[in-house]
Structure formats: C-alpha cells, structure tokens
Image (cartoon, helix red, strand yellow):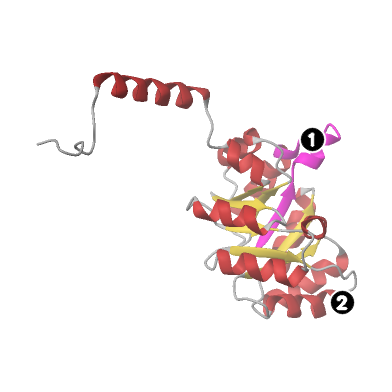
C-alpha cells in the first residue's frame, strides 16, 4: 500500500520524504491556506522534494470550464502533479476530459460507492474516499472503503482507492486489511505509525545489556 502525507506544510513533506517510505502528498485548499505560503510555491516545492511521488493539488473552480482551465494550469507546473477535482457533475465531466488528455485526476470528497463508481468510469486515477468525516457523524467510513475496493476489483477499473480523512493509525491498519491502494494521513498520524510500547521497552533493554557488558562496535582508541 502506498503512503501519502496529507499536508500543506513543505517541511512536513521534507521530513516524511527523508524516511524513505513516502509515495506522495495530498493537499487541499484549507491545508494550503493554513501554510501561509502561495499555492504554486507550495506545490512546486513539494514536487521538487518528492520528484518520483504523486503530488495532488486541488482546483477551486466549480464549473466545467473553470475546472479544466485551472487543471491545465496546475498540471503544467510539474510532471508529478495529480489534479484534485471535487465529486460533482461538473467535476465528473471535467475528469472525463482530463483523463482522455492524459492528465491524472484525484477525485476528492467521495463518500459513497455510487460516487466512486462515477469517478472510476470517468477515468480518475485516484478515488479519495473519506472515512474520518463519516465516522464523525456515526457512520462507518471503512465499510465504504471495503465496498469501493471490491467494486474496483470486480470490474477491473484502473482507478486506485485512496483512503482519505484518516484520523488515527487504526484507520491505516484497516486500510491494509481491506486492500486499499493508498492511505493519505496527517503528518502526526504518520509519525504514530513508528511507535509501539514493546519496541521502546525492547530497545531500552538491548542497550542496557550492551552497556553493562562493555561491548563496542568500533574498538576504542589505543586498543589492539
């Protein structure tokens, strides 16, 4: 499963990329607005940090013409950009045009299998299915992931299922179990994936035993 970080902060992308496990970045207008930097400046910086990853940048137009105009502009900034388009009738129409032109699209704000079907048929590269926001209103976000993954597999669509609106590491684990293609998460959730109390206890014990035994990997200066 591919791991994306969901952020508008360039430094978070830089840090996550340094770990060697980052496959891409997702952004949205709210995240970019919070960054305090310009849109193009932020997106192109992320593209440079992760040249072989997918960087999703979102349009803000709401008509077909506006979406297409903005998508062409955004896609021209770097070859690894994926244009995010909202799940609306205009968004679906624009996605069909863009996919035929070879421009990759991340269809966002998908909350149901029926919406995911439309995105897949329109040729979306990624279908961003939101889980946390559904859980917030007492729904079952991961149930939708299960249904969309099954749909893509059953009908052999080329679209990849991207789990979005991730709130905690368990959402990532459930995404693995269900066979989702991508999970995008806030930087703090990606950091949490590293941690397990038994890892901390085990490492501390190993190091204590090593120090008590007086062992060395490199011979001390002056030793024969």
Specify the quadrant of the image occupied by residue 167.
Answer: top right
Q: Residue at x 61, y 68 (%)?
A: 47
Mark 2 surroundings: few (<14), some (14-19) or many (≥20) residues within 10 A = some
Residue 195 lies within the magenta run: no
- Estimate the x, y position of residue 108 in percent, counting from the top left: 76, 58
Q: Residue at x 65, y 46 (%)?
A: 187
- Compared with 117, 217 (above or below) is above
Camera-side residue of 132 and 111: 132
- Compared with 211, 90 (above or below) is below
Give left or right: position of 41 versus 61.
Answer: left
Q: Circle 1 sits in a helix, a strand or a loop, which is it?
A: helix
Q: Which residue, as the protein is rendered here, is positioned at the far right?
A: 63
Chain-order first, disc 2 or disc 1: 2
Q: Residue at x 61, y 56 (%)?
A: 13
| Magenta span of residues | 125-142
- Compared with 146, 32 (above or below) is below
């Amino acid at each position: 499963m591919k791991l994306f970080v969901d952020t508008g902060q360039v430094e978070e992308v830089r840090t996550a990329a340094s770990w060697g496990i980052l496959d891409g970045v997702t952004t949205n207008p709210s995240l970019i607005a919070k960054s305090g930097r310009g849109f193009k400046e932020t997106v192109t910086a992320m593209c440079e940090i992760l040249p072989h990853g997918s960087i999703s940048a979102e349009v803000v137009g709401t008509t077909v013409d506006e979406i297409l105009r903005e998508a062409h502009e955004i896609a021209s900034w770097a070859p690894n950009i994926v244009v995010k388009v909202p799940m609306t009738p205009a968004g679906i129409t624009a996605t069909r045009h863009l996919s035929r032109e070879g421009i990759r699209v991340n269809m966002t704000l998908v909350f149901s299998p029926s919406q995911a079907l439309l995105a897949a048929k329109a040729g979306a590269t990624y279908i961003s299915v939101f889980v946390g926001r559904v859980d917030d209103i007492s729904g079952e976000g991961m149930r939708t992931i299960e249904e969309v993954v099954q749909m893509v597999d059953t009908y052999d669509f080329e679209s990849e299922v991207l789990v979005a609106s991730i709130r905690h590491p368990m959402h990532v684990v459930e995404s693995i179990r269900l066979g989702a293609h991508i999970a995008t998460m806030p930087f703090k959730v990606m950091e949490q994936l590293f941690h397990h109390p038994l890892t901390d206890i085990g490492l501390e014990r190993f190091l204590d035993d090593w120090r008590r035994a007086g062992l060395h990997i490199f011979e001390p200066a002056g030793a024969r």
